[in-house]
């Protein structure tokens, strides 16, 4: 589903939105590197979005759980360590102003977080609304720290509270942005500051309802924030800065010979994000795609590298694999309907999963059998209980989904044949042919996933320096039918 951006924005000068992830702002040295990268782009009128320092959001999640479960002292000890980490970074980045900054800008927020943990402990409950408030502290701390570090480097940086700009609904933990309200607030709170020569710095991931109640966009949502702001500003481009050299033909931790993808289409990049490539958040690309704004994925540790350009490209009838993606922690649920899978029962199954807020990665259906790839064992168990006498549910945990991603991949018999021939001795639990023709996916045991990824990558990507030289696309023979039955994605 796309996002509707009403009106036309005539800015006069192009703007740039730059998002820096947690590893890019993990410590004083990393933040200093970010300041230098931003300085080199001042002529492009940048707006900067930052994640929490690496590991902080996970730490806050742990603090909340500890407080809820009665271990308040342990939670406060973790918070104290987090406070020290930010304080030490401030002292390293701007030693002459660090104490005043910490006293006036950060300590009140840490005190607020402390009070929230004590409240959770008192009621022994951590609601989604309270958790969103707690998790948002990471970006509230980091954005203020980075803005002050920029000023110490001579940049005219100004902190902007993301909660005042990113307006959402009240669907806590996965809030939906209210685009028209955001566009209006961007026009009053960000655009004038950019036009006056300032560099606005905002926290990603966080927003608030129209009534000012804190919300979050879901884990990894800082990319989403950058894309929304870029679309609202009609930016020239959006840069996502991380700790890898753009998007790769496979996870380099699995395949040491993985190659950089220099250019990829929006739809292929979105498919990769959905099927496990963690460089981009799955929702990131839609606002940028709606506006036709290119997104660059770049490495803050090696800013000289070209990274990956994600852009609108011409639809091609040729099929080729752009990457081998892997998604772990998958639960396979096989539903066997005793009286056949009628439309009413199928609809009830998906409604039940939606109530569980369970993501269905892929689904395949026959007359009496429905196979589902779920992200939660508990959702599979709830589905089994829901169906009871109407169907039996066989649940297989410990699965991984290995996917070949690329335009028209699933329609190309030569790719299917090459992939299957690379896996002669590896047990496959299921094969899914996506309805979008953008993926061909294999369900395997989690312990076999790395071996499957390596075998497929070796077969499909000869060891050469760049993806556009790796192999010519395999021409699609339209007279041939796909080797595998289609399944609903």
Image (spheres, grey):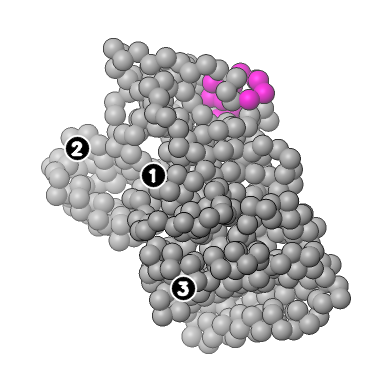
The answer, for residue 460, to whether it is visible in the render is yes
- Precedes in sequence: disc 1 or disc 2: 1
Report x, y in % for residue 213. Answer: 45, 78
Residue where numbered disc 2 is placed = 368
Residue 460, magenta (yes or no): yes
Which residue is disc 1 drawn over? Answer: 361
Residue furthest right as drawn = 96
The boundaries of the magenta stretch are: 453-466
Question: Callout 2 environment at 10 Å: few (<14), some (14 to 19), or many (20+)?
Answer: some
Q: Earlier in the sequence, mark 3 or mark 1?
A: 3
Residue 216 visible in the current orientation: no
> What number is the disc on residue 208?
3
Residue 112, placed above or below residue 368? below
Q: Secondary structure at mark 2?
A: loop
Quick check: is 86 in the magenta stretch?
no
Is 374 on the left-hand or right-hand side of 72?
Answer: left
Q: Sequence order check: which comes first, mark 2 or mark 3?
A: 3
- Report helix, strand or loop for mark 3: strand
Locate residue 58: give its quadrant.
bottom right
Crowd tier of the residue under label 3, counting other residues whose Cα lies within 10 Å: few below 14, some 14–19, many 20 or above: many
């Amino acid at each position: 589903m796309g996002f509707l951006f009403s009106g036309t924005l005539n800015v006069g000068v192009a703007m740039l939105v730059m998002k820096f992830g947690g590893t890019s702002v993990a410590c004083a040295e990393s933040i200093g590197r970010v300041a230098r990268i931003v300085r080199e782009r001042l002529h492009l009128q940048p707006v900067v979005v930052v994640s929490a320092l690496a590991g902080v959001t996970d730490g806050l999640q742990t603090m909340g759980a500890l407080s809820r479960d009665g271990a308040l002292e342990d939670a406060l000890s973790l918070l104290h360590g987090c406070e020290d980490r930010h304080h030490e970074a401030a002292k390293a980045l701007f030693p002459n102003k660090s104490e005043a900054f910490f006293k006036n800008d950060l300590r009140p927020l840490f005190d607020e977080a402390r009070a929230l943990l004590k409240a959770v402990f008192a009621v022994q409950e951590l609601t989604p609304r309270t958790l969103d408030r707690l998790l948002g502290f990471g970006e509230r701390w980091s954005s203020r720290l980075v803005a002050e570090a920029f000023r110490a480097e001579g940049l005219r940086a100004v902190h902007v509270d993301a909660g005042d700009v990113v307006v959402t609904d009240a669907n806590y933990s996965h809030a939906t942005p209210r685009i028209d309200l955001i566009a209006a607030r961007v026009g009053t709170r960000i655009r004038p500051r950019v036009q006056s020569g300032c560099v606005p710095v905002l926290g990603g991931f966080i927003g608030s309802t129209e009534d000012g109640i804190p919300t979050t966009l879901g884990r990894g949502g800082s990319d989403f924030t950058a894309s929304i702001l870029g679309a609202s500003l009609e930016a020239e481009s959006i840069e996502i800065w991380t700790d890898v050299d753009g998007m790769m033909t496979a996870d380099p931790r699995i395949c040491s010979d993985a190659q950089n993808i220099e250019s990829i289409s929006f739809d292929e990049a979105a498919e990769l994000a959905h099927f496990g490539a963690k460089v981009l958040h799955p929702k990131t690309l839609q606002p940028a795609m709606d506006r036709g704004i290119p997104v660059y994925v770049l490495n803050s540790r090696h800013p000289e590298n070209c990274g990956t350009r994600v852009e609108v490209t011409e639809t091609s009838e040729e099929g080729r694999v752009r990457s081998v993606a892997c998604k772990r922690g998958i639960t396979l649920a096989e539903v066997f309907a005793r009286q056949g899978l009628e439309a009413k029962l199928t609809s009830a199954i998906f409604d039940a999963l939606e109530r569980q807020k369970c993501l269905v990665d892929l689904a395949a259906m026959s007359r009496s059998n429905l196979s589902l790839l779920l992200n939660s064992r508990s959702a599979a168990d709830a589905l089994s209980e829901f169906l009871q006498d109407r169907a039996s549910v066989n649940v297989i945990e410990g699965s991984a989904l290995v996917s070949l991603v690329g335009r028209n991949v699933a329609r190309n018999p030569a790719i299917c044949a090459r992939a299957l021939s690379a896996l002669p001795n590896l047990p496959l639990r299921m094969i899914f042919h996506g309805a979008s023709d953008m993926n061909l996916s294999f369900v395997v045991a989690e312990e076999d996933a790395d071996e499957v990824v390596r075998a497929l990558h070796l077969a499909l990507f000869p060891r050469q320096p760049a993806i556009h030289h790796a192999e010519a696309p395999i021409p699609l023979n339209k007279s041939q039918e796909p080797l595998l039955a289609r399944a609903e994605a």
